[in-house]
Image (spheres, grey):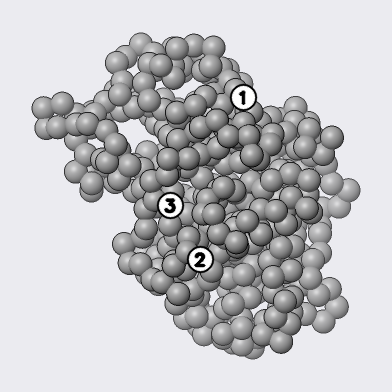
Amino acid sequence: MKQLAWLLALLGCLTVTNSSAEIILGNQTNADMNIGCLFPLTGRGGLYGEDSKIGIQLALEQLSTKPNRYPSLKILIKDSRSKASRATRLVKELVQEHQVRFICGVVNSSIAWQVAQVTQEENVFFIGTDHASSRMTGSGTRPLYFRVSNNTQQSMLAGAKYIREHFSFSAENPIRISYIGPDYEYGYTVWDDLENSLKQQNVNYEVVTTLWPTLYEPNYSNFIQALLKKPTDLIINSMWGGDLVTFIQQANNTSLFKHAQFANFDTGANFEVLAALGNNMPEGLILASRHHNNWPETEFNQWFVSRFYELSGHYPSYAAEGAYSGIIAIAEAVRLAGVNASNEELQHVLENLMIKLPEDPIGFTSYMDANTHQLQQVISIGTSTNDKSLPPAARLLNNWSVYYPDRRQSH
């Protein structure tokens, strides 16, 4: 029943509710550091907030195995309700009433942009764990903002490399690409980053069409028909969550997946999408995610996935590892700089941060880029194949293509 409720929540058929607008984790009485986290705990985005909460619990569990090494943390999780006005108000409340020095979380890129402005005004750090717009990590623009999950620029660069390696094109015969993405900040940034990356990788391409459905669009029939009307080699989709599920379900009733190859290089293989679709997920789609439950096959990732399942009764969405990463990053920064460190000292430590995460393959440790404040990670792209090892998903990714950041560091 717990899995059924989870899947219904993803599809928007059930509103996730929580009796409290605030959850407190960690040391509630005498913590060394207060942290405020903003996630949707109710409504359509509630799954990501609930999974983030469990990811934070796993981070605290890891930190508790080394009690004398890491500072004690009090973590206040507030329900953003996916609303920018509420999120920005909560930042001020957390800083002024609860004396937090770190804000973490935020799912939506447009909301994150506004939260970053307020955290800068309040002179506190913002550790982004979910949203992906690369506009957030421009060189030197926000000294107190750091992101610990892949941004769209990283995902699209990996996607462009994948296209270069797996598709045929030439100066005379460019690869024909159609793009469909949500009509807001995230969708636009994905397309800009993809075009820039294709040019960087010297991929000769032709744009067949670009389509912009609204977020939470219920009917994609006209968009699917528009994609079917023109010859295309590759359809690139940047929808996520319930929107991607709905699109694939509706496309299954057409010849779209025979018309052209289909890719989603950022969120297509998020586990909640695979689980919601089950046997309705086609095989052979080119997909990626910010965290995979079946890659890398390391003890650390297997612990993270299995322990999450023990606590929740379902396998984690990518949001869980993002929230885990955010808390680990804060704890490590405070450990290195000291609980009484100035913002300048904490910023310096964060700019040189290295943290081992469940998504890191053997021999690689995620590290922060000091210039952009964007964590550098390995990105893996695969194809959907028949695999029922993590139910209710019936397809998982295999046939991996793995892309390291330009500067590799092994620890």
- Number of the front mark, 1 or 2: 1
Q: Is residue 67 above or below residue 282?
A: below
Distance between the alpha carbons at the discs numbered 3 and 2: 19 Å
Identified at 49% across, 11% down, the residue is 254
Identified at 22% across, 31% down, the residue is 168
Identified at 57% across, 52% down, the residue is 130
Instruction: Measuring from the top left, give residue 312's x and y in whole percent.
Output: 78, 49
Distance between the alpha carbons at the discs numbered 1 and 2: 38 Å
Residue 28, located in which quarter of the rendered image? Answer: bottom right
Q: Is residue 150 above or below residue 236?
A: below
Lower position in the chain sequence, tag 3 or tag 2: 2
- Identified by mark 2, the residue type is Phe
Residue 363, located in which quarter of the rendered image? Answer: bottom left
Lower position in the chain sequence, tag 1 or tag 2: 2
Q: Which of the pair 205/2 is nearer the observer?
A: 2
Mark 1 lies on a secondary structure that is: helix
- Number of the front mark, 1 or 3: 1
Q: Is residue 398 above or below residue 105?
A: above
- The reply to whether discs 1 and 2 touch (Cβ–Cβ < 8 Å) is no
Which residue position holds label 2?
146
Answer with left or right where residue 4 lies relative to residue 398.
right
- Identified by mark 1, the residue type is Asn
- Identified by mark 3, the residue type is Ile
Which residue position holds label 3?
379
- The reply to whether discs 1 and 3 touch (Cβ–Cβ < 8 Å) is no
Which residue position holds label 1?
279
- Number of the front mark, 3 or 2: 3
- Count residues near mark 2 (Cα–Cα under 10 Å), then give few for <14, some for 14-19, many for 20+: many
Mark 3 lies on a secondary structure that is: strand
Q: Which of the pair 305/372 is nearer the observer?
A: 305
Instruction: Measuring from the top left, give residue 269's x and y in whole percent.
Output: 53, 39
Q: Quadrant of the C terminus?
A: bottom left
